[in-house]
Image (spheres, helix red, strand yellow):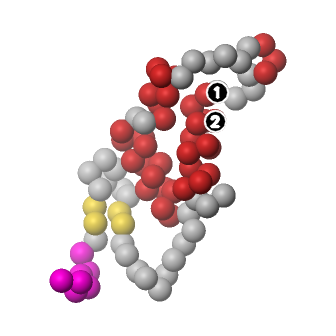
Amino acid sequence: MGEKTRETLKLQFDKRLRLEFHGARITSDAGLLACRELDGALGLTEMAPIYLQETRGGRNVQHELVPLIRQSVYSPLGGI
């Protein structure tokens, strides 16, 4: 238990994305890439307009709802 393995974790939803764990080499954005891939595969933020009602109108609507929700979700995940 706890032994180090050299095996790479391959994800089912995007074969191009792979995860390798290197404790000494850390990046600040790689975790968000995996979150975005998971979100895309499950369609979580894409479902938001089904459950949330758009009340903005006219000139107040500069950005679509889904990208705003993604920003609201990913910012805390990224530590922003």
Magenta residues, start to end: 1-7
> What element does badge 1 sit on?
loop
Within the image, what quadrant is residue 9 found in?
bottom left
Instruction: Kindly indicate the quadrant of the structure image that contains residue 7.
Output: bottom left
Which amino acid type corresponds to the residue marked 1 in the rendered image?
Glu
Residue farthest right in this picture: 59
Name the residue at the left extreme.
Answer: 1
Magenta-colored segment: predominant secondary structure: loop
Give the image location of residue 72, x and y in percent: 61, 43
Q: Percent from the top left, x then y, of residue 57?
A: 73, 14
Residue 42, quarter of picture: top left
> Looking at the picture, which amino acid does disc 2 mark?
Leu
Q: Position of residue 26 (x, y in %)?
A: 51, 77
Q: CA distance from mark 2 to mark 1?
A: 7 Å
Determine if the magenta segment contains residue 4: yes
The disc at residue 68 is 2
Q: Is residue 49 above or below residue 2?
A: above
Of all residues shown, which one is farthest toward the top?
58
Q: Is residue 80 magenta?
A: no
Mark 2–mark 1 CB contact (< 8 Å): yes
For residue 24, side relative to residue 41 (left or right)? right
Disc 2 secondary structure class: helix
**Quadrant for the C terminus in the image:** bottom right
User: Residue shown at 61%/28% (left/top)?
Assistant: 65
Nearer-the-camera pick, 56 or 33? 56
27 with respect to 63 (left or right): left
Which residue corresponds to the image point at 59% horizontal and 54% vertical from the top-left? 76
For the N terminus, which image quadrant? bottom left
Instruction: Depth check: give the residue in front, 51 or 25.
Output: 51
Q: Which residue is labeled 1 in the image?
A: 64
Crowd class of label 1 (few under 14; some 14 to 19; many from 20; radius 10 Å): few
Q: Is residue 80 above or below residue 61?
A: below
